[in-house]
Amino acid sequence: MSPPVVADLHLHTTASDGELTIEELPAVAKEAGVDWVAVTDHDRIHPGLDAPITTIDGITIIRGIELRVETDTQRIDLLGYPVEPTSELTAEIERLQKNRINRAKKMIACIEAELETTLDIAPSSGIGRPNIATAIDESSASYDYDGAFKHVIGRDHDCYFSRNITDLEDGIRMLNDACSIVGLAHPLRYDNPHSALEITERLDAVERYYPYDGQVDSSIVDQTAERNDLLVTGGSDAHHKELGEAGLSKSQLNEVKAKLHT
């Protein structure tokens, strides 16, 4: 029997494309039996967290980030925590968020024209395709959330527009300067997991525990973690209001805590 999950180190809030607010987070974490969480919004540091590590209502919250980077062969996501922003990382986040807003405006205009509907959404920092899919679902259009991705804003559709991505070298450097732990997120979700895992030679950690769909052989992640002497992290990647679907046991959390700066 697996030990209980006490730490969920990968979740998203309303600061990007999640449903949770910081105010709701402690109660949701307690309901899930989780003592530690990491807020890892997409390309953004949560503006409501004023310290790298905060305790609210008995729940310890790590201020983190999930940063998408461009490699020679694919796009991957890096997790950094806790974040103490540098001027370079702050400037990059501002650049990325400005691009997200401009991209969303183009997508919304295209969708409204193509579907002859009006979307009740105002582009702001943190906006991503999930936010737009939700707006489509709630509009007069005939597509639900999943249908919006499949038929309207998927990568092969006219209303999809690409966004700016941070270069791998720049991303690793900036996160290393701002965080004590930098890891690879959900390594088995990429088109080429082997190529993604090769990058961990330059990182501190790899996300071992993650709610992958279907049966997934995680042995390659274990082998990589051992070979590169990596911390293992884990989390639910929650975009909703349920935590603890995946994460770390108490002993695994203690290994991560030993590497965190405060």
Image (tube, grey):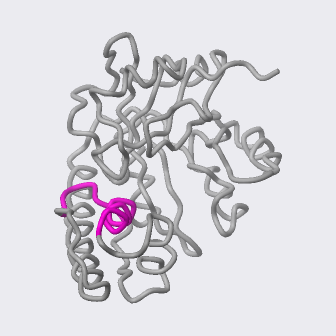
Q: Residue at x 32, y 62 (%)?
A: 138
**Identity of the residue furthest to the top in this view:** 58
Does residue 135 show up magenta in the picture? yes
Q: Residue at x 50, y 56 (%)?
A: 77
Where, quadrant-wise, is the C terminus in this rendering?
Answer: top left
Q: Is residue 11 left or right of residue 219?
A: left
Does residue 117 show up magenta in the picture? no
Q: Residue at x 62, y 43 (%)?
A: 206
Q: Quadrant of residue 107?
A: bottom left
Image location (x, y in percent) of residue 223:
80, 44
Which of 43/135 is in front?
135
Q: Quadrant of residue 229?
A: top right
Q: Which residues are magenta?
A: 123-139
Where, quadrant-wise, is the N terminus in this rendering?
Answer: top right
Q: Residue at x 41, y 57 (%)?
A: 171
Q: Is residue 93 left or right of residue 12?
A: left
Image location (x, y in percent) of residue 177:
36, 42
Which of 172/59 is in front?
59
Image location (x, y in percent) of residue 118:
21, 74
